[in-house]
């Protein structure tokens, strides 16, 4: 069995997912090809969701730090 590729970046996964969707929408594929593409698309969508969830967590942490800093040192807060 072939070893799985390393996790692609968000941008790589999104680009490949876009291509998968385009190929599925174009049609002309066998049922087996369509199923394989669908499964690949599901995996890519999960990778994108993982990246986005990670970004949400980082953003929430940064906003919490900013809020904590602002409430503790209001004169030093940039906004």
Image: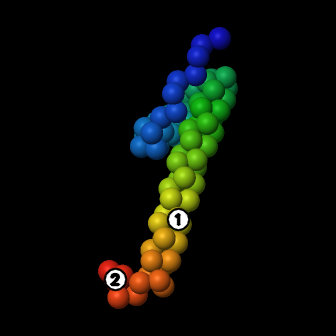
Instruction: Give whichever of 35, 44 is nearer the camera.
Output: 44
Question: Is residue 26 in view?
Answer: no
Instruction: Give whichever of 24, 15 is nearer the camera.
Output: 15
Picture layout, residue 59 above or below residue 34: below
Percent across and percent down for residue 72 are: 47, 83
Disc sitting over residue 18 in the figure: none
In the image: residue 12, left or right of residue 41: left
Question: Is residue 54 in view?
Answer: yes
In the image: residue 52, left or right of residue 35: left
Name the residue that disc number 1 marks. Answer: 61
Give the quarter of the figure containing the C terminus.
bottom left
Disc sitting over residue 76 in the figure: 2
Percent across and percent down for residue 42 are: 63, 39
Percent across and percent down for residue 76 are: 34, 83
Kind of element beneath mark 2: loop
Q: Neighbour class for label 1 at 10 Å: few (<14), some, many (≥20)?
A: few
Q: How is the image coloured?
A: rainbow
Instruction: Give whichever of 28, 13 is nearer the camera.
Output: 13
Instruction: Give whichever of 44, 72 is nearer the camera.
Output: 72
| Image quadrant in which you'd find residue 2 | top right
Percent across and percent down for residue 45 are: 58, 44
Q: Neighbour class for label 2 at 10 Å: few (<14), some, many (≥20)?
A: few
């Amino acid at each position: 069995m072939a070893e799985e590729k390393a996790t692609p970046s968000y941008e790589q996964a999104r680009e490949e997912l876009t291509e998968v969707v385009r190929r599925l929408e174009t049609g002309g594929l066998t049922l087996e090809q369509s199923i394989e593409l669908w499964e690949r698309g599901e995996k890519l969508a999960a990778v994108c969701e993982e990246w986005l969830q990670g970004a949400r967590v980082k953003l929430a942490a940064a906003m919490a730090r900013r809020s904590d800093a602002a409430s503790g040192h209001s004169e030093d807060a940039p906004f």
